[in-house]
Amino acid sequence: MRSYANILAPHSIRVNSVHPSGVKTAMLTAASMTAFLEANPQIAAGFAATPMPIDLLDSRDVSNAVLYLVSDEGRYVTGTTLPIDGGRTNKN
C-alpha cells in the first residue's frame, strides 16, 4: 500500500488500507461460526481482545471510515493503515 501510495501520488491518486477487527456480519454471527469459536476459544479471544468495551463492530463503523478516506476531508490522507478495532492494535 505504501509503495503504491508513493508511486501514484504524483497522479493525485491516494492509497490507504483499512483494518477492521471482527465485524457483525452473517459470517461471524452464523451458527456454524459460533460453534467453531466455541470449540476454539483461543481464536475467539482474538475477536474480543480490545481495550474498548465492544463486542463486534457494526458494518457502518467500517463504512464511515472508508467514507472519510474518500471524502474531501480525507483528500490529503495517503499511505496510511487505518485500524478500526477498538484499540486492539494499540494493545498488542
Image (spheres, rainbow, N blue to C red):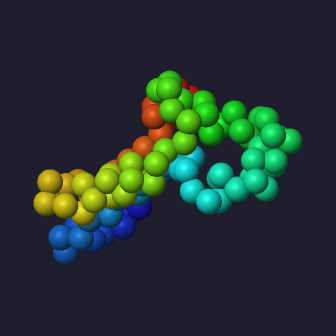
> In the rendered view, would you say 77 is above or below 42?
below
User: Where in the figure is residue 38, as x and y percent of width and height?
Assistant: 81, 40
Residue sticking out furthest to the left: 72
> Quick check: can you spot residue 79?
no
> In the rendered view, would you say 54 is above or below 17?
above
Looking at this view, is 15 or 21 the one in front? 21
- Residue located at (39% from left, 48% from top): 61
The quarter of the displayed image where residue 72 is located: bottom left
The quarter of the displayed image where residue 55 is located: top right
Residue sticking out furthest to the right: 39
Side of 54 where 70 appears, left or right: left
In which quadrant is the C terminus drawn?
top right
Side of 14 where 28 appears, left or right: right
> Quick check: can you spot residue 43?
yes
Side of 38 where 70 appears, left or right: left
Looking at this view, is 73 or 60 the one in front? 60
